[in-house]
Image (cartoon, rainbow, N blue to C red):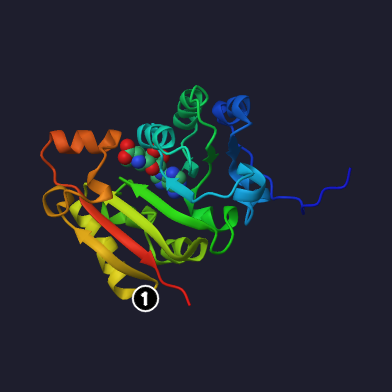
């Protein structure tokens, strides 16, 4: 049968969890498998109109599972590039009652390949790997190029929420944001729980966040609004 879609570039992986993730193919899409939904996640994947939310770096999925259970009326896409972690999360997601989510085992640098222009209502990005050594800083996900990709896939006035424990990474993000005219900084704090206790970002704790809070590390956060004509 002829496909409506052009062939996608092929990814190969030695990691055994790449194959194992097929067990959950009703909601897990690997690498470029989500690209056929680009621009039509609500219509063709979720088959309903609802706010589309993307969480980058879902990790062990504490936030994703809790949020999907408490917010059945959103269309939620979780994403992480770690194989085994994704498999373990997929197992847990498969036990949820709600069917308001998909999961991408994919690299967030490809966010603009997986989502269409102005498609997403909110992007969430909690406790990104800080790559603290100078020689590794180029591995940080939050770079000008990445910001442009997130801007592209967000709707006008769409939101980008970020939390981190890492002061220097927060300064790095602030520097990139100050240089950019793509987003309005609605909220920026180097201790959100003290400064904005009623803010959405202060209303939950992710797995990594609990560890940092136990060590007494203040949580930094940004709420950004996507500016488009
Ligand atoms: C420190 S953990 C935080 C996990 C979770 N958000 C939390 O707060 O508990 C960072 C997560 O981001 C994922 N990650 C880092 N870079 C990524 C990328 N480029 N694409 C997708 N996931 C990424 C890692 O695999 C890891 O699971």
Q: Position of residue 157 (x, y in %)?
A: 42, 66
Please say whether residue 175 is visible from this viewpoint.
yes
The residue that appears at 20% across and 56% down in the rendered structure is 168
| View quadrant of ligand 1 | top left
Instruction: Find residue 134 and report its image quarter.
Output: bottom left
Observer-nearest residue: 71 or 13? 71
Give the quarter of the figure containing the N terminus. Answer: top right
Instruction: Find residue 140 and report its image quarter.
Output: bottom left
Q: Position of residue 224 (x, y in %)?
A: 33, 62
Please say whether residue 164 is visible from this viewpoint.
no
The residue that appears at 59% across and 43% down in the rendered structure is 31
Q: Which residue is labeled 1 in the image?
A: 181
The residue that appears at 60% across and 49% down in the rendered structure is 42
110 left or right of 175 in image: right
Q: With respect to residue 14, does 153 lie above or below?
A: below
Q: Residues within 10 Å of mark 1 (few under 14, many from 20)?
A: few
Q: Position of residue 98 (x, y in %)?
A: 51, 30
Q: Position of residue 132 (x, y in %)?
A: 25, 50
204 left or right of 10 in image: left
Observer-nearest residue: 13 or 223? 223
Q: With respect to residue 209, does 179 lie above or below?
A: below
The residue that appears at 80% across and 52% down in the rendered structure is 4
């Amino acid at each position: 049968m002829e496909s409506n879609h052009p062939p996608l570039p092929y990814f190969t992986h030695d990691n055994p969890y790449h194959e194992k993730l097929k067990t959950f193919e009703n909601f897990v899409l690997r690498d470029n498998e989500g690209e056929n939904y680009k621009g039509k996640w609500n219509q063709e994947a979720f088959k309903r109109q609802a706010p589309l939310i993307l969480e980058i770096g879902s990790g062990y999925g504490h936030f994703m599972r809790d949020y999907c259970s408490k917010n059945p009326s959103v269309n939620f896409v979780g994403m992480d590039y770690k194989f085994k972690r994704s498999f373990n999360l997929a197992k847990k997601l498969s036990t949820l009652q709600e069917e308001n989510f998909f999961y991408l085992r994919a690299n967030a640098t490809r966010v603009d390949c997986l989502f269409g222009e102005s498609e997403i209502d909110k992007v969430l990005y909690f406790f990104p790997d800080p790559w603290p050594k100078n020689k590794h800083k180029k591995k940080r996900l939050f770079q000008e190029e990445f910001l442009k990709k997130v801007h592209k896939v967000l709707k006008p006035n769409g939101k980008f929420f970020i939390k981190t424990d890492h002061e220097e990474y927060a300064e790095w993000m602030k520097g990139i944001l100050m240089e950019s005219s793509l987003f309005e900084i609605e909220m920026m704090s180097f201790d959100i729980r003290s400064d904005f206790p009623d803010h959405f970002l202060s209303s939950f704790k992710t797995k990594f966040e609990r560890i940092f809070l136990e060590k007494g590390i203040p949580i930094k956060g940004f709420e950004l609004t996507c500016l488009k004509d």
